[in-house]
Image (tube, helix red, strand yellow):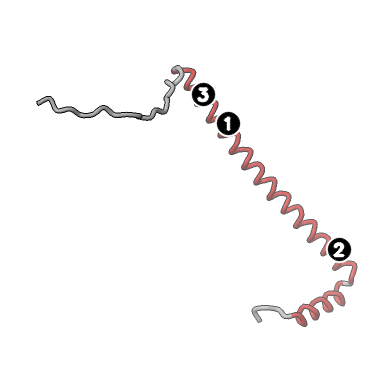
Amino acid sequence: MPFMQGWEWVILIVLGLLIFGGSRLAGAGKNAGRALREFKDETRQIKADEERAQREAELERREAELAERERFGAAPKVFDAEVVEQPEKRDHA
């Protein structure tokens, strides 16, 4: 029985109602919903904490890089250049 069909679910629900009663099943569903909500909130919080830690690590790396530059002096500025015309080669024969 790999998959439950519709009538099997109906039988399980009826048996659950007979054994536990409606109020206990409703309470169990409420508690399950609350547990799922708390689980989602915790996973969101973990992701937010990881992102915050990554941002802080990047900020610390940049601050260390700036401190290193200040310590050894600013790096020379590099300018992009484009060769407009090349001189012709002349043979001196």
The answer to which image quadrant residue 33 occupies is: bottom right
Residue flagged by tag 1: what amino acid is it? Leu
Q: Nearer the viewer, mark 1 or mark 2?
A: 1
Residue flagged by tag 2: what amino acid is it? Gly
Question: In the visual, does 38 lie left or right of 56?
Answer: right
Q: Which residue is mark 2?
A: 27
Tell me the SS state at disc 1.
helix
Q: Nearer the viewer, mark 2 or mark 3?
A: 3
Q: Earlier in the sequence, mark 3 or mark 1?
A: 1
* Residue located 71% across and 79% down the image: 4
Q: Is residue 26 above or below residue 70?
A: below
Residue 49 is situated, as x and y percent measured from the top left of the image, at: 65, 41
Tell me the SS state at disc 3.
helix
Q: Earlier in the sequence, mark 2 or mark 3?
A: 2
Q: In the rendered image, which quarter contains the N terminus?
A: bottom right
Q: Which residue is mark 1?
A: 59
Please tell me how crowded label 3 is: few (under 14), some (14-19), or many (20+) other residues with Cα within 10 Å: few
Q: Mark on residue 12?
A: none
Residue 79 is situated, as x and y percent measured from the top left of the image, at: 42, 25
* Residue located 75% across and 52% down the image: 38
Tell me the SS state at disc 2.
helix
Q: Is residue 45 above or below residue 74?
A: below
Please tell me how crowded label 2 is: few (under 14), some (14-19), or many (20+) other residues with Cα within 10 Å: few
Q: Which residue is mark 3?
A: 66
| Mark 2–mark 3 distance (CA, rounded to whole Å) | 58 Å
The answer to which image quadrant residue 73 occupies is: top left
